[in-house]
Amino acid sequence: MREGIRNLEASKIREVANAGMGRSDVLAFWFGEGDEVTPEPIRQAAIESLQRGETFYAHNLGLAELREAIARYMSELHPAVDAGRIAVTSGGVSALMLAVQALVDAGDEVVAVTPVWPNLTAQPAILGARVRGVPLVPTAGQWTLDLDALRAAVTPATKLLVINAPNNPTGWTLTSEEQQAILGHCRRTGTWILADEVYERLYYEPSANGCAPSFLDLSAPDDRLVVVHSFSKSFLMTGWRLGWLVLPPALVDAMGKLIEFNTSCTSVFTQRAGIAALELSHEVTPRVVSHLKACRDRLVPLLAALPGVQVAPARGGMYAFFRLEGFDDSLALAKRLVAEAGLGLAPGNAFAPEAQGWLRWCFASKDLDRLSQGVERLRAWLASISRA
C-alpha cells in the first residue's frame, strides 16, 4: 500500500456518525444532506428510463441532451456557457477528483482555503501533492477571507488553488470583487483555480440571478478555471451521484479520457433524472432555498441564545457553524453530544485544524421543530454539565 494512502486520515464526521448510527434516540444533523426525498417527477424520469431498457453505456462526457440542458441552465445564471465545455460526472465528489487528476502531479503545490469539506484537501494529497491551507478568519461567528494572505500563499510555484464558496462548513461566500482579485492574481502566477460551487443556489443574500457570485461571471472560457457543480443539494438528489464540470475547451477531451478510466460514464437513467430536474429548476430549487432559509432562521437565533455560543447566520450553504466556549476538542465534544444528549453534529476539526472547537449543524430538515428539539437537547446538556 502507498504510504500516502496508509497515512490518509479517516473522516471524523463518519467517526461521530458511526458512534450514533442505529440509535433511534439520536437527532442526527451530521451529514450534509436533508431528509426530503427527491421530487417525484425526477424519480419518475429514472423509472421510465429503466423501463425503456436504457441500461447500457453512455458517452464518457454524458448524454448530449443533458450537457445541453446543463448549458442552458448555467447560461440563465451566468454568461453563456457552451455545452461543449460540460462534462457529466458520477457525483460532485467524482467531478472534484477528476479535476485534481487532470491538473495535479505528485509533488505539486496545492493551496486550499480552509476550513473546507475534507475531501477537497484529501484528494490532491492522495495524488501526492503538497497541500497548504489559507485559513478563513472567524469574527463573532462569521468567517472572512484575508485576501492578502491568500495572494501571498499563491505563487508561481502553486499549481492549483482550491476554493469552495459558498463554503462547507462555514457558510462563507466570496464577493465578486474578491473573485476578480483572485482570478487576476492566478492569471499572473499561472495557477489553476478549482472552484467548488455546488452550493451556489443555496444563497440567502440579495442577488440578481438567484445565486452566489461565481468565477464564471468574470472569467474567459480559456482561463485556467474548472468549476464543479452537483445535483445533490439544489435538487434534493444526494444519493443519485450526479454532477458536472465546466471546463476550458482545451481540457474537455482529456477529461473524457479520465472519465473512461474512472467510471466509464454516468448511468443513463440517472442522467434522465438530471434532465427532469433541470426542467423543474424554476420550481424545485426556489422552494428548496426558501425552506432552507426558514431552517437557518429558526436554528441560528436559538443557538445564539445559548450561553457561550458563537454563531452567525450563514450567507450560503446549509450549515450553522458554531463554537461552544470552553470546549477545545471538537471530536470529543461531538462524541459526548451523541452519547449524552442524543444529538449528532459534525466536529469542526474534521474540516481544518483552525476549526478545532467548532461544530457543524446541517439545518436541512423538513420539520423545523426538529431543529428546535435539537437545540433544546443541547441547552439541557449544557445545563446538566454546569450543575455537575
Image (tube, rainbow, N blue to C red):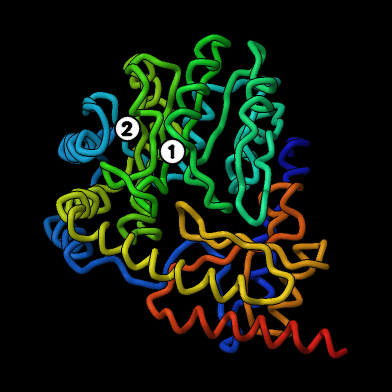
Give the image quarter of residue 367: bottom left
Give the position of the C terminus as an image quadrant.
Answer: bottom right
Q: Residue at x 63, y 85 (%)?
A: 377
Mark 2 and mark 1 in contact? Answer it, CB < 8 Å: yes
For residue 84, which quarter of the picture? Answer: top left
Instruction: Tell me where residue 95 appears, x and y as whole percent.
Output: 43, 38
Residue 254 % position (x, y):
39, 20
Query: Which residue is at a point 52% across and 60% down the rendered structure image?
Result: 313
Residue at x 44% of width, y 31% of height: 261
The residue located at (49%, 38%) in the rendering is 174
Q: As displayed, is residue 158 above or below residue 232?
A: above
Q: Secondary structure at mark 1?
A: helix
Rendered image quadrant of residue 18:
bottom right
Residue 205 badge? none
Q: Position of residue 341 (x, y in %)?
A: 69, 84
Q: Three-letter amino acid code at disc 2?
A: Ala
Per the rendering, the mark at residue 95 is: 1
> How many residues crowd mark 2 within 10 Å: few (<14), some (14–19), many (20+)?
many
| Residue 87 - label | 2
- Badge 2 marks a residue whose secondary structure is strand
Q: Is residue 179 above or below residue 223?
A: below
**Image side of residue 193 versus residue 346, left or right:** left
**Image location (x, y in percent) of residue 12:** 69, 59
Q: Looking at the image, tell me whether mark 2 or mark 1 is earlier in sequence order.
A: 2
Between the residue at mark 2 and the residue at mark 1, the CA separation in whole angstroms equals 9 Å
Q: Residues within 10 Å of mark 1 (few under 14, many from 20)?
A: many
284 with respect to 251 (left or right)? left
Residue reaching furthest to the right: 388
What is the three-letter code of the residue carrying label 1? Answer: Ala
Looking at the rendered image, the quarter that the N terminus falls into is: top right
Residue 369, relative to residue 206: is it above or below?
below
Q: Nearer the viewer, residue 333 or 21?
A: 333
